[in-house]
Image (cartoon, helix red, strand yellow):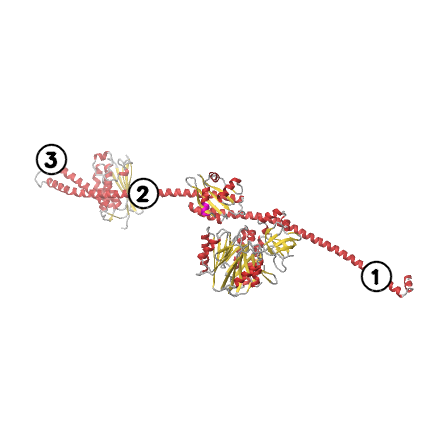
Amino acid sequence: MEIFKTLFTKSPLDLLLIVAGVISLSAVVVLAAILLRKLEQTRELKKSFEKLNRSFNDLDEQAKLIVRTDLELNKAQEELDKRLSSLDALQRTSRLISTTLDANEIFNRLNKSLVNELGFEKCMILALDNEKKFQCRIETGFSKESVQKILRLSEDHSAQNILKEGRIFSSFNAPKQKKEKIIQIFDVEHFILSPILSQDGMVGILFVGNASLDAAITQGDEELLSILANQVGQSLENAQLFEQVYNSRQDLESNIQDRTRELELALEEVKRISKMKSEFISAVSHELRTPLTSIKGYASILLAGKLGDIPQEVKERLEKINKHSDNLVRFINDLLDISRIEAGRVQMTFDKHNIATLVENIRDLLAPQMKEKNIQFSVNLADQIPILLIDGSQIERVFINLLGNAVKFTPVNGSITLRGTRQNNEVLFEITDTGIGIKEADAPRLFDEFYRVDNEINQNVKGSGLGLTLVKNIVEAHGGKIWLNSKPSQGTTFYFTLPIKNT
Amino acid sequence: MPSSHLNLSSVEKTHIGIGFSRELTTLLAAREAALEAKAQTRQSSVDVAIVFCTPHYSPLETLHVIRQTLNPAKIVGCSTAGLIVSSAVEMRGITIIAISSQDIKFSAAVMENIAQNDLRPLGAMLAKNIVGSPEQSKRQSMLLFSDGLIANYSPFITGIQEMLGRMFPIVGAGSSDLFHFKETHQYFQDKPLTRSVVALLLGGQLTVSTASRHGWKPLGKPRYVDKVDNHVIKTIDGKKACAIYEDYLSLDFKNLKKAHANNELALYPLGIYLEHHKEYLLRDIIDIAEDGSLVCRGDIPAGAEVHVMINNKDFCKSSGIEAAWDVKRNLADKQPKLILIFESLTRHKLLGRDSSDEIKSIKEIFGPSVPVAGMYSYGEISLLKSEQSNEGSQLQNGTITIFAIA
């Protein structure tokens, strides 16, 4: 109230000044408040900026961490990639060279693979020849002049010591002097040199290299080449073994062919001689038979007394001539038959024959001899034996021969058995006696011409030694087989088969 | 980088064959590749042979054998550290792409022995020469093979663009060796050249499509280029330029130089931020000067925001697949007759054994019957396109650049 009273007492000018003063004061207060607010905002902005800057810096620090980690990862990845690629290439290369047994092809495949798969700029394989001198087998990345230069330099004594050391080394780990020598010889910056070893020792060296300084060799490369060189050594050894085996086989085949040719020639010669022998026998037999017929004819005339009576002593002599003439005729006939059968000139006359009937006829024929020695003869022919398509007279000769022999070699009171059975598509005949038997050594030659077993009976009884040969030829001419089983003092069994043909 | 679609008429009566050989000798390899390429074209004559050859072979003999075997009207190409053949990657061999066409017209030109600092007029001169050639007809696209050892040929491209137009599609690659940086070759007719740029102009009735990607991602806080001389960065954020790598890799200057010599920096290029672009523009560090400057492959704008970039195999492969899909999309329903791939050698270093997986995936996108060939390069030339506009062809690094002819 006092203030208002005081104001009413003031002049208008004073009042105006007072109002202006109040307003100014208020403005100052407001401005101060705004300023304070702005200052506050600036502080907040500054804080935000600092925060943002800190975030950026943090982000940058994280980025640095990421880059450094990424760099390490990339290096590791690159090395891993290289190793994997190398192993992959090694596997492919190994497969390539192990699938051939030709040394030249191994080198050829290796050359491409070393360059294409393993990625070396230069490669060379120097193989040791018989004089232990290096010969270039493959090379890539070298000019002809360079190859000649390398071969020339490799003959140097110090170079020989290094190259023939027999241990792998590279620009990665070789001593300075050794390294410089190889660089001088091969004109590269980085290299690996590995021996190629086989069981016989060092057979060559495998060299790979890069001419550019940047393409350095790593320990991984060296390990890789070491494995590859071993593989090459093995493959070359396999190729060498194969070549040896192949050559041996070729020699063997050549020898076999030579022997076969010789045997063929010998066989031809045997056939030729055999034919000559058959022809000779045939010719001689024919020549003998004619005068023999005359001798026998004249002897018969004389014996018949057609030329007058003859004294008893002459008659006896003539009967002997007649008898021996008959023996000689039989012998000649057998010889002729054998030679004809062997020469294929005898035409078998196949007819239907009942084997039982045929055997009965022979039993009658041989009955007197069997009776004389009291030999028991039994025949056992199976019912299943069919009518056979055979040359009756020839098969009859077979039975007569075999049974005749059985009678001959079976002692008094012995026994002979003839058995016949069907065995699938053939008939098996067995003629068993209880005779003196045959030694094992004689059995293989029993069917040979003129072969006679040396025993007591044969020494007393004359024979031609052609009977069993003839039997064998007749059986075989029928498509059958003949063999025997015998034990001395226990007896002998002759077996022969005759095929059952469609009658 | 985003793709480009060039709406041109379809290719007719065009026969393309790709021959490859990794025989041991130049004679055998060149002859085998040439005969295979010719056999695939099924034509009696070849208009142009694009040749990529690894350093294992004599370039002079290679070109001589190709001339004898194919006798093509034009031979262009370059040496490379590695080859892309169908769905495989080969680090040794010769690839020959033989083209015989009644629809496509080819003109070739070369700028030899580039020595001067200002490359822009030389680019313009090359363009002038090629445009003035008698075969020139309705130009559609240009393939460029330059010496990858030339540090910065961005101005050369600018020179070409001054003649042919800024938006004219130029696609190509820098010849490479196996990170040796010693000598690379460019092939023009029967001559292997060094420090040269070879151009092949494609005109007539064809459709082309191109796209490129790299997949690298930025790391850390942004930094700004203070002082730059074209492709040489002097300082970044007030410090000598190499400090950025010393800092990130925790290496002193001497060891940083050593890391660079071992190609360890190749996987961490600088990335330049570009507004409205999906990816950063990469610059490989090709040298570190004694004063700490970073020598890059390609121009760097002053004041550019840069990052150290990082990539991994998955991002890398995905970027290749994205580029392939872009090319395919741009071709719409047209079946490509040839796919050419120019891929940074850095990507091969990063992908290692997975390199062929990336190529297989790309091949699958285009189909088994489409011929694919390419090379690993030091720098790629491809269209730089933002989400809003086409900025024309530029020298890029770290990319896979796919070029299709349909």
Callout 1 secondary element: helix
Tell me: B238 left or right of A456: right
Task: Work out how far the residue at label 2 is from the one at label 3, CA to CA, in angstroms.
Answer: 67 Å
Magenta stretch: residue A146 in it?
Answer: yes
Amino acid identity at mark 2: Asp
What chain does badge 1 belong to? A
Q: Quadrant of the N terminus of chain A?
A: bottom right
What chain does badge 2 belong to? A
User: Which SS type dominates the magenta stretch?
Assistant: helix
| Magenta-tinted stretch | A143-147
Q: Nearer the viewer, mark 3 or mark 1?
A: 1
**Which of the 4 image quadrants contains residue A337?**
top left
**Residue A417 location, x and y as percent?**
27, 40
Magenta stretch: residue B61 in it?
Answer: no
Task: Work out how far the residue at label 1 is from the one at label 2, CA to CA, in angstroms.
Answer: 141 Å
Is tag 3's residue or tag 1's residue first in the polypeptide sequence? 1
Task: Work out how far the residue at label 3 is from the one at label 1, CA to CA, in angstroms.
Answer: 203 Å
Q: Which residue is mark 1?
A: A24
Amino acid identity at mark 3: Glu
Q: Which residue is mark 2?
A: A258
Q: Nearer the viewer, mark 2 or mark 3?
A: 2
Tell me: A298 left or right of B301: left
Residue B94 or B7: which is nearer the viewer?
A: B94
Is tag 2's residue or tag 3's residue first in the polypeptide sequence? 2
Q: Which mark is residue A313?
A: 3
